[in-house]
Each structure stands twice: as C-alpha cells, then as structure tokens.
Amino acid sequence: MVNKKDNAQFMPTVAIPPGETIRENMKYLGMNQRELALRLGITTKHLCNVINGNDPITYETALKLETVLGPKAQFWMNLETNYQLTKARLKRETDLEADLEILKGVPYKNMSDFGWVPATDNRQERINNLRAFFGVASLKAVPLAVNAMFRKHKQIKEISDLGVLAWLRKAEIDGLAVEVKKFNRTKLKKYIPQFRGLTLKSPEEFIPEMQRLCAECGVSLVLVPSLPKTYICGATFWRKGNPILALSARGKRVDIFWFTFFHELEHIVSHSQKISCISYEHNGHEDEADEKASDYLIPDVKYRKFIKEYDYKDKNVIREYALSIGIAPCILVGRLLHDKLIDYRRYSDLRPSFEIGY
C-alpha cells in the first residue's frame, strides 16, 4: 500500500533557473562565460540571459549544451521545464493570495443561494468557482471582463462593486443562452406600443410575452435577482452583435420594473453599440433615457392634461384615466409619486409588487 506522504511531491518555494547548473559546470571545467559562448556558438549576451533565467533553453541550445558540457539534452530541457513550471506555480500562488483578498468583497453566499455558483465554505473552492463563473484566470481580471451601461437606483449609499460585476456577469451568461434573431432596431421601435400595452397584464402574462417580442427583434431580455448593495434596476450591453437587456425588479414594484424596461429600451433604440460602460454617476445618457422612458409610457401631452384637468389625487380618477390611455394605473401612480404630487402611503393598493424567481 502506497503511503500518501511518501508519494507527495516537493513544491519548491523559489524558482531556480537552469543557469545555476550551467554556472556550476563552467566552474568545474574552469571555463568563463566568453569561452563557453564561443564553444556553444552563441553570443555572450545570450548566454548571460540564459544563465540568469531571462532567456529559455531551447531545443537547439540543449543539444549544444549536451555536446559542450556533457549531460544529455533532455537533462537541460527538464531543468528548463521545471524552472518554468515553478515560476508559473509561484505566480499562481501570488494570484491566489490576491484573489483571497478579493473574495472578501464578493457576495458568494447570495450567489450560491441563487444557484449561480456551487455552495461551499472552502475558500479555495470558492475562488475556483468564481473564476469559472466570471470566465477569468484570476479575479483581478473581473472588472476588465465585464462591461455594461446600467441604471442604478438614485438613492445610492454604499455600493458593492463586485456584487455589481457578479450581477452583470449573470445577466451576460443568461443573455447569451437566449435564442434571438438578428438585431432589428426598426422592428424594435415598432413594437414599443405593444410593450406599452403589456403593462395592463399580470407578470405571469407580460414577462414571457416581453421576452418573446424582444427575441424577435434580436434582444435577449433576462431577469436577474438583485444582490445586496448593488442597487441596480437594469442594464444594457452588447454581445456578439446583439443587445442584452437585464432587469432586477429592484424596488419590487411593477411601475419601477416597467420604467426601467423602457429606460433600457431607449439605450438600445437610440444609442450605438459603442456606448457600453460601467458608471456609478448619473450621466447625460441616463437623463435622456429617463425622459424617453417617461414619454413612452405616458406621452407628456397626456400627462400634463391629466394634471391640469383632472383630480389627480382621486384613486378612481387615476385608475380610469390610466386605462383610457392604455396603461396600467400603477404607471400613472408611479409618475405622480416621482413628481411628488401624491403621498405614496395612500396609493400602495394601486402599485402591485412582484419579485423575480430564481
């Protein structure tokens, strides 16, 4: 029976270049670098780089060393291979230490609860799972691997950058798994009235229909539950020539969900693929998208007419007017709340809530 301890491999903590062995052989033969370089038929500079580990021992150099110094070419190649493997292993250990520090800021437990990564308390396993999830060799590369323009909740407090990146990555994974047609911006614009009409339906009805219509236009619509301290309502980004539109249902209100959808839709309809970035600041593109989303849902002319000519604080009036212009009452309530014309505590019954399952 083999003892595991006897079978264990020694893992060096320092990478020693083959040049140390070359140097020992030179000393034994009473040879300096200039003489050995002449015998090998290479420059003194190149030999110096090989000895110091800056240049690798090639097959050709190994054969020359075999002839001049004696040990077989395979011996020199083995030294070079072990040197390179040790360097790579030590670098990986350094990367692991950096990843262990990064791991502290990742909401791993929440991600595993959602089924995004396997559940485990082992830190090494968590790092390996996260590397696979993000598709990176080191977690240091995560910010470079994930790219999007997203709408954040305006009441930002402390935000988890890694939580945001994890949410965006999950949206990317799910979005790439959706079968969609070639992106058609013209068709997407024509479907806006149909999307608007879906506000009158329940989530069980409007979500699959939204996804179907989006797929016909070449858009992957995915619903991704929100992670703690991410504050993201939605995001848009492009992959393989098609846009991915992700929604979190943050706020758990149908009107917020719809406003975010039309906000992200505006990014796709009006902006190029090149506008794709992660930003925590409320920029010009976001203001423009907010205005367009409001107008898509309730044309400004109709909204102003309602404020001027109707009793906008009366629930029945709100309900009847919303239905008369073809939208759910919660959309109008949300607009009135945004403009601080009504008290949210009195109109909660007109604002249904829902959550994204996982």
Image: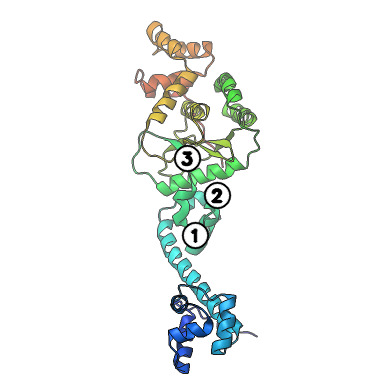
Which residue occupies the foreground of this view, 238 or 319? 238
Which disc number belongs to residue 148? 3
Q: Which of marks 2 and 3 is in front?
A: 3
Discs 2, 3 touching: Cβ within 8 Å: no
Mark 1: give few (<14), some (14-19) or many (20+) Cα within 10 Å.
some
| Residue pointed to by mark 2 | 116
The answer for how far apart the CA atoms under marks 2 and 3 are is 19 Å
Quadrant for the N terminus, please.
bottom right
Which residue occupies the foreground of this view, 9 or 21? 21
- The residue that appears at 43% across and 66% down in the rendered structure is 94
Quadrant for the C terminus, please.
top right
Secondary structure of the residue carrying tag 1 is: helix
Tell me if I can see residue 241 in this picture. Answer: yes
Locate residue 353, reporting x and y percent: 49, 29
Query: Earlier along the polypeptide chain: callout 2 or callout 1?
Result: 2
The answer for how far apart the CA atoms under marks 3 and 1 are is 23 Å
Which disc number belongs to residue 47? none
Q: Which of marks 2 and 1 is in front?
A: 1
Above-or-below relation of 23 to 182? below
- The residue that appears at 44% across and 26% down in the rendered structure is 289
- The residue that appears at 41% across and 25% down in the rendered structure is 288
Secondary structure of the residue carrying tag 2 is: loop
Type of residue at label 3? Ala
Type of residue at label 2? Trp
Which residue occupies the foreground of this view, 22 or 39? 39
Displayed quadrant of residue 175:
top right
Query: Earlier along the polypeptide chain: callout 2 or callout 3?
Result: 2
| Residue pointed to by mark 1 | 127
Locate residue 178, reporting x and y percent: 63, 39
